[in-house]
């Protein structure tokens, strides 16, 4: 059970670090999506609104608190809650997983049958 929590903590921490250290500024992306010639004041206002101007450790603990409370934040691309985007994509994702597993089972059975038929490599 402890291993589970260590893995979850590692995944959450890694996703936070990837988000922070990608080199892109989410506030700038949001503002430039609406205004091509955005001013620094507009970008700074969005940074403040999103809490991106807070120190690293405060942002990390807010992120951890949000993940464990079910608040995954707002998507940069469409400004909707992330959980809503996940729920929309979940049925298609599950369908793809089921189809992939079906293909794997089918090919595994075919390869196993073929291997049994040609047991000694004889044709």
Image: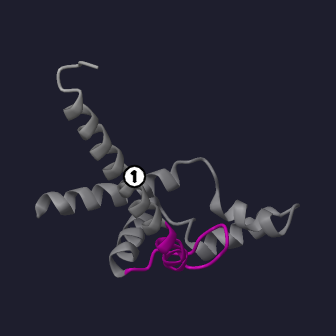
Q: Residue at x 18, y 26 (%)?
A: 119
Along the horizontal axis of the image, is 77 left or right of 42?
left
Q: Residue furthest left?
A: 1
Along the horizontal axis of the image, is 24 left or right of 103?
right
Q: Is residue 94 above or below residue 104?
A: below
Colour mapping used in the image = one colour
Along the horizontal axis of the image, is 59 left or right of 5?
right
Q: Is residue 21 above or below residue 48?
A: above
Residue range (magenta): 70-92
> Within the magenta stretch, is there residue 88?
yes
> Within the magenta stretch, is there residue 90?
yes
Q: Residue at x 70, y 73 (%)?
A: 45
Tag 1's secondary structure?
helix
Along the horizontal axis of the image, is 64 left or right of 56?
left
Q: Locate residue 83, reporting x and y percent.
A: 48, 77
Sort mark 1 into few (<14), some (14-19) or many (20+) by Cα contacts within 10 Å.
few
The N terminus sits in image quarter? bottom left
Q: Residue at x 23, y 27 (%)?
A: 118
Q: Is residue 28 shown to the viewer in this render?
A: yes
Q: Locate residue 3, reporting x and y percent.
A: 15, 57
Q: Residue at x 28, y 46 (%)?
A: 109
> In the figure, residue 28 lies in which quadrant?
bottom right
Kindly identify which residue carries mark 1.
103
Q: Locate residue 71, reporting x and y percent.
A: 44, 79
Q: Locate residue 31, reporting x and y percent.
A: 76, 67
Q: Is residue 1 above or below residue 78?
A: above
């Amino acid at each position: 059970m402890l291993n589970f929590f260590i893995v979850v903590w590692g995944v959450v921490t890694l996703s936070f670090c990837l988000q922070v250290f990608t080199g892109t500024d989410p506030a700038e992306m949001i503002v430039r999506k609406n205004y091509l010639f955005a001013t620094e004041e507009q970008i700074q206002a969005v940074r403040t609104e999103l809490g991106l101007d807070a120190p690293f450790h405060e942002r990390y603990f807010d992120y951890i608190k949000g993940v464990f409370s079910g608040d995954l934040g707002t998507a940069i691309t469409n400004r909707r809650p992330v959980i809503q985007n996940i729920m929309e994509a979940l049925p298609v994702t599950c369908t793809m997983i089921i189809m992939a597993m079906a293909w794997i089972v089918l090919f595994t059975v075919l390869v196993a049958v073929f291997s049994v038929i040609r047991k000694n490599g004889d044709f």
